[in-house]
Every structure is written in structure tokens, then in C-alpha cells.
Image: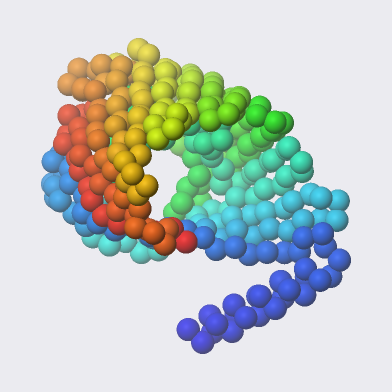
Amino acid sequence: MKKILIATTALVATTGVAMADGHESGPELNISGLARFGVGYNDSRAEEAIIISRYRLNFDASTETSGGVRLAARVRAEANENADGTANALAFSGARYQISYEGLRVRVGNISNVFDDGGTVQPFADIGLEGQIGMIDAFGFPGASFSSTGAGVNGINAKYSAGGFSVMASFADDGFSVGEDTGATDTAIGASYKFGDYQIGAVIGEVDSTAGSNNYYLVTFTGSVGPVGFAVNVGENETAGAGADDVAYGGSISYDVGAATTVQLVFSAGGAADAPGNSEAIGVGFVHDLGGNANLRGFIGQDIDSATKADFGVRFDF
């Protein structure tokens, strides 16, 4: 502990000197994250009820040149429970690097593709503590994503924003795998437009591997009207498996019950849910604000494999 305190003091002192040494905005190191823990239930597991948990730390280093160019880098440390409910050790991610100037932002290294980045399409309306059921369950998840506990891909994504409009493209091939093929490539492009409390976005992409070329597209529309929030999507993903050649669709609707509690309904249908033996995914959950960036969360529902799932616990962000 003493060594950590000494190192932290030295870092703060060094940062202070750099900021006073002629930079427009000197080097900074910000640490943020979240912690969550509770109980999760899944009747398709050998251990149906387990203790669930996550501890996440984001280490974001940045500086700004005298010309106004911002340079940044992120690594993440994360610990989650194992599938059988046992605890797992903290693991570090690969690094993600960023350069941005005015409306342009470029990221390289351990990146997310356009679909997973979240700034163009809004596909992840999940509920509960872990997000075991979401509105893209019947669509599936295509392509590359930021790895929280591993090296991740070695890719690039670029985004340009002006006013409410943004356009983004991504490419990844090193470290991205499909089945046994570790040389798969993922290419995607998308655009979005935000107007008032609403946003519409679309992405198209292609995953190439030794198994063939798989294409996907998704359109999302999100917004809020007073205490009601909503999100809908429609798309097709050939990588989602048998029966997934049909169009998939999903949605979420939330309602603020007073100042502290929000209830939410999520569903997903079509696509992989139409495959033999599968069914639509649906769930209902809540978030109750405890103050101090802490909240209670829980849900119950059914996934596309007809498994009953539920969880309940607490989360706090820092």
C-alpha cells in the first residue's frame, strides 16, 4: 500500500509539472469504473443460481498539443464471476489509442466496430444487473468488440461528427476470430442523426472468414417523451446462426415511476428466434436509484433458447 501511495503522489506531481510546462492541456490520468454484485438465475445452467459480480477499472491517459490535437489511450482491468459462480481474478485488457481534432476521432488497437461502439446505432437496451436479455438477442452480435479482459483485435475506427450528424467506419483483422479462423476480417460503416430527444442510426457490415462472407445491417431509433423512453431496431445478421436469415427486430420501453425508480420492458423476435426450438426473448426489469451513484437492479424473463433468467443486486459507478 505504501508503494502505491508513493507512486500515486509521484504521478500527480509529474502531471502537475507537465500541465504548467506550456501545454494547452497537460497530461491527465483519469480512473473510472463500476462495481456490481448480486444473485443470478438461469434454469439452463448446471448451477441455476449463482453469485454474480463485476469489478471494472478504466485507466484513461490523455494530453492535448498546443495545436489542439487530443491524444488519449485506455486500458481496462476487470474481474467477473466464472460460469459456475466461482470468483475470477482481475485481468487487464489490450490498449486502445485515440487521436481527435475538432469533429474527427480516430481509434486504433483494441477497438470496437461501428455496431459495438454505441455512438452510431443504439442496440444494447439490456435489463437487470448483467443484461442477460436484450433487444438484439434474435439478431446476434456481429464482428469485433473492445475486449475488457484480453488483447482484443488490432483494428481501426474513425468517426466524424458535425452538429447532430455523425458518420463512422471500422476495420479489424488481427486477433479477430470466427470459429477456428483467427484471421477473419470485419468491415463496417454507419451513420446517425440526432434531433432533439431522438436519434436514428444505421450500420452495414461484413465479416469475412474461411467459413464464408457474412453480411449484416441494423437500423435503430431511440428517444424519450417525458417519463417514457423507447428504442426499436430492425436488421438482419447472417452470422446469428440457423434460422437467422429472416429479419430480426426488437425494442425496449421504459417508464420513470417517480424520481427514483424506472421500470423497463425488453423484447426481441424474428431472426434467430424463428429457428426451430427457439422463441422470442422478453423480460421486465427495474432500476432504483439509491443516491451516491448507486442503484438496485433486477429483472426476470425468457431468452430465445426458452431459458428462464433473472437477477437481482446492486451497482455503483465511480
Relative image position of residue 297 (x, y in whole percent): 29, 49
Q: Which of 66 and 205 is in front in this view?
A: 66
Name the residue located 35 percent from the left edge and 29 percent from the top edge: 252
For this rendering, which residue is in front, 178 or 225? 225
Instruction: Give the side of residue 51 with respect to residue 247, left or right.
Output: left
Residue 118 seen in render: yes
Furthest residue toward top: 246
Left or right placement of residue 70 versus residue 313 in this view: right
Q: In the image, residue 192 lies at what x, y percent? A: 59, 25
Residue at coordinates 20% horizontally, 17% vertically from top-left?
Answer: 276
Q: Quadrant of residue 204?
A: top right
Q: In this view, does 231 lie above or below 29?
A: above
Residue 136 seen in render: no
x, y (%) of residue 54? Answer: 35, 57
* Residue 91: percent from left, percent from top: 43, 60
- In the displayed orientation, state which residue is furthest to the bottom: 2
Query: Which residue is painted at 68% across and 64% down in the image?
Result: 28
Q: In which quarter of the image is residue 23?
A: bottom right
Count of numbered tags: 0
Q: With 98 as the anchor, is 1 left or right in this view?
A: left
To which quarter of the image does residue 156 belong?
top right
Relative depth, front residue between 175 and 28? 28
Position above or below: 290 against 41: below
- Colouring used for the render: rainbow
Residue lying at 65% horizontally and 75% vertically, measured from the top left: 11
